[in-house]
Amino acid sequence: MHDIIEPILPQVPVEGIALHVGRSRLSMGDTVTPRLMPEGLVGLWARIFRPWMGIVPLWREGYIGHLGPMASQILAPALEKGLALRMRVVMLTPEHLAGSGQPEIHVSVWGDPRLLTPFLDGIAPPPPPAAEEPPPAKPARKAARG
């Protein structure tokens, strides 16, 4: 049986960035691994460049940051159940290109769209459009005889 994979959260910002984005060699399209943290947030790990002793090039699994509380609330049940999620880096702004000096990382989350069902139940569907009433019929004019 195939799992349904659709975008759940197309672009989510990573908070608490814990690395120097410019030196990490993290790039768009890289795979991100989510893990549930004790604080209830979803932590994100990726394969990043961390040279040993500043000389020997090594790629290691490293913590890059965490998702915000709302995104963590949506993804936590899936991580607890072990459901398949696919996460990728979709936007990246390193320190030297950020106008404010703060780096940015955004990820996309793909998985079973039924994960969003509990969050959609509380939202009432929009009311149906009101049917337009036909304009009142004009009285027929009698033809003038002459």
Image (spheres, rainbow, N blue to C red):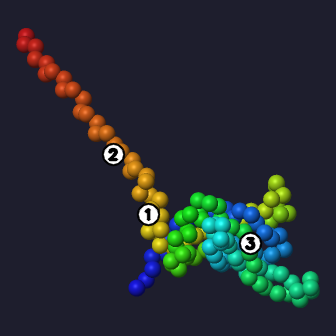
Q: Nearer the viewer, residue 16 or 146?
A: 16
Residue under pointer 1:
117
Q: Nearer the viewer, residue 75 or 26?
A: 75
Tell me where residue 70 appears, x and y as whole percent. 59, 59
Q: Which mark is residue 26?
A: none
Q: Nearer the viewer, residue 57 or 70?
A: 70
Mark pair 1, 3: CA separation: 29 Å
Closer to the observer: label 1 or label 2?
Answer: 1
User: Which quarter of the rendering shows the C terminus?
Assistant: top left
> What kind of residue is marked 1?
Thr
Residue under pointer 2:
128
> What kind of residue is marked 2?
Pro
Tell me where residue 41 appears, x and y as whole percent. 64, 66
- Residue 112 vertical placement versus 134 (above, below): below
Q: Quadrant of residue 114?
A: bottom left
* Sequence-first tag of 3 and 2: 3
- The answer to whether 94 appears left or right of 76 in the picture is right
Mark 3: secondary structure: strand
> What kind of residue is marked 3?
Ile
Q: Nearer the viewer, residue 88 or 145?
A: 88
At horizontal 52% and vertical 71% (from top left) the residue drawn is 77
- Residue 3 vertical placement versus 10 (above, below): below
Q: Quadrant of residue 26?
A: bottom right
